Structure formats: C-alpha cells, structure tokens
Image (cartoon, helix red, strand yellow):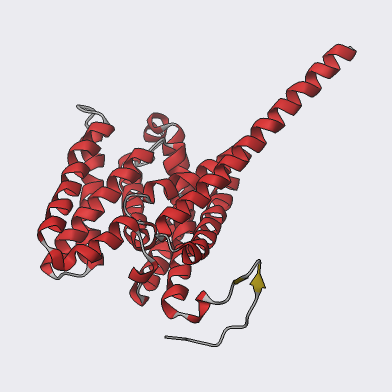
Amino acid sequence: MSVFAAPSVVIIGVDLFEPLQFGFFQRGLTVASLAGGLCGLVGVYVVLRSMSYIGHGLSHAVFGGAAISAVLGVSYFLGAGLWGVLAALMIGRVSSRRVIGADAAIGVVTTASFAIGLAIQSRSGSVSRTLDTVLFGNVLGVFPRDVVAVIVVGTVVVVAMIAFRRELTFATFDPEVAAVSGVPVRLIDAMLMVMLSATVLVSVRVIGALLISAMLVLPAATARLTTNSIGRMLWLSPLLGAAFGFVGMYVSWYADVPSGAVITIVGTLAFAVVYLSADVSKRRAITKLDDHAALA
C-alpha cells in the first residue's frame, strides 16, 4: 500500500524513490540504519575485547528464545529478550569462573538454545516462516513495534555508553588493574553482555540471526583500520554501521535478496576496500622511508 507519492529520481535506470512508496520498506530502512549504528557502537567493545564469538553465540540463543515465544504465543521481545539476557548472563557467569573458557561456555549455552529453536521450527509449520525471518532477516518482517524497540534500546545503550565509558574502557584494556582501582568489573561486564544481547534482539528482524555477528564486527573492524583512538572509533563505527544498513537495505530491494545477506556483503566490501587502502598506504610509507635512506 502506497504511503505517499514519492518523486522520481532515476540513476542508471533505477528509480531510487520507488521503494519509499511502501510503508514496510520505510520501516525496514529505518530499523536497518538504526540497528546498524547500534551494532557499530556496541561492536567497538566487541572488537577491542575479541568477543566476536559471543555475538555469534547470542544470536543463536535469541533464535531459540524466538522459537519458544512463537510457539507459546508470547511477545517476541519478551520471550526472546528474556532468553537472550539469561543466556548472556550465564555465559558471563560460567566463563568468569575460569573452569572452562568463554568459548566453551558459549558452545554449551548457545548451541543448545539454537538446537531447541531448530527442533521447534521443524515441528511447528505455523511458525516456520516467522522463524525464517529471524534466521535470515527480511524487510517484510519489520513492524512498527520493531522501530520503537530499536529506538528505545539504542537510546538506553547510548546513555549507558556515555555514563560508563571510562569504566568500560578501563575494564576492556586492563581488567585486573581496573578491579584493584575500584571499578566493578563483573558488573560492567554483565552490563555489556546485556547491551549486546539487547542489540542482537532488536537487529535480527532485518539482519538475521545467522549474520548478526558480522554486523557487530564489520563496522568496528573497519573503523579500527583507520584509527588507534577509541574515542574516534565510538563515533566512526556507528556511522559505518548505519551506512551499511542503509545501503544494504536499498540494494536488497532491487536484488530481491534477504536484507541481512546484502547488508553483510556491503559491510564486507567496505572492510576490504579500507583494508587494501591501508595496506597500500603502509607500503607507500615504507617505500618513502627506503627512498630517504637511499638518498642519505
């Protein structure tokens, strides 16, 4: 159903305003951009802490919660949200005891949750299509409540990041010294895990559970190639994430491919370009040093 009569802007035979005539695409574009920015922001600490496997694991845990909530007829955000937060806290608790590594804790907690989701999906045909959206992401699966959810979660995460930036940074780079200095490292870690699970929860509708971990890593990893400053990463990474979501959503419309896949491909291409450019710059810098040495 048409929401408004959009003007026509044609570039290389493509009308850029065509998809904006549809309300579901407007919602998808909004959520993709906001969720991409949110993933980019939280992803800064995911990359700096080498926690990409946790984002991957939490996406699997959220899928299990989504399957259970769909079968029980419970709200997706309530069922999958509680399940994801519980899984995040369990991972943090198990790994903090140092009896087994964090990777093993993730393997135990999240793979079981994902297996439960797959079992439910195979046995419940009525919810299979809904769970496909959670797995792969789809602009058609975005509803007005998803826009509200990503705005609320994004606002809370931004406020928390600003309020606890010093503690988060201290606990990231030197947790032992931070604990001695009075920083509640366990509480900070738990807060980060909850923010991470909430980010995954509100992003899977567009990006998909199977690919959300990539969006937690790609913007921050791309930003990391351009700067050594965490302050710059905290604004550059969300901008890149939002751009990946915006461009990927547009391309997915014309390519008729699931939005999560295209958003991830766009982010990967951007990372590759920045990586190769940085590599070329380093080689040029080395060449200039060699030239100076030869002249000397």
Give the quadrant of the C terminus: top right
Residue at coordinates 38% horizontally, 40% vertically from top-left?
52
Q: Does residue 227 appear in the picture of this structure?
A: no
Q: 220 or 11, which is in the foreground?
A: 11
- Along the line of sight, which residue is nearer the eye, 30 or 90? 30
Task: Please determine whether, in this image, residue 280 is positioned above or below residue 189.
Answer: above
- Identify which residue is drawn at 14% across, 64% down: 125
Residue found 44% across the figure and 31% down from its top:
174
Quadrant in which residue 130 is drawn: bottom left
With respect to residue 74, does 8 lie above or below?
below
User: Where does the image place residue 185, in percent across and percent down from the top left?
Assistant: 35, 39
At 12% from the left edge and 52% from the top edge, which residue is drawn? 119
Q: Position of residue 11 (x, y in %)?
A: 66, 69
Q: Quadrant of the N terminus?
A: bottom left
Residue 223, position as x, y percentages in the image: 57, 44
Position of 294 with respect to 102 (left or right) is: right
The residue lying furthest to the right in this view is 295
What count of labels does the image hold? 0
Q: As rendered, which of 29 and 181 lies closer to the eye?
A: 29
Expressed as whole percent of the image width and height from the top left, the position of residue 206 reads 38, 62
- Horizontal side, residue 172 vs residue 63: left or right: right
Q: Tell me the quarter of the picture where residue 275 sits.
A: top right
Residue 217's place in the image compared with 260, above or below, is above
Residue reaching furthest to the front? 13
The answer to whether residue 281 is visible is: yes
The picture quadrant where one finds residue 133 is: bottom left
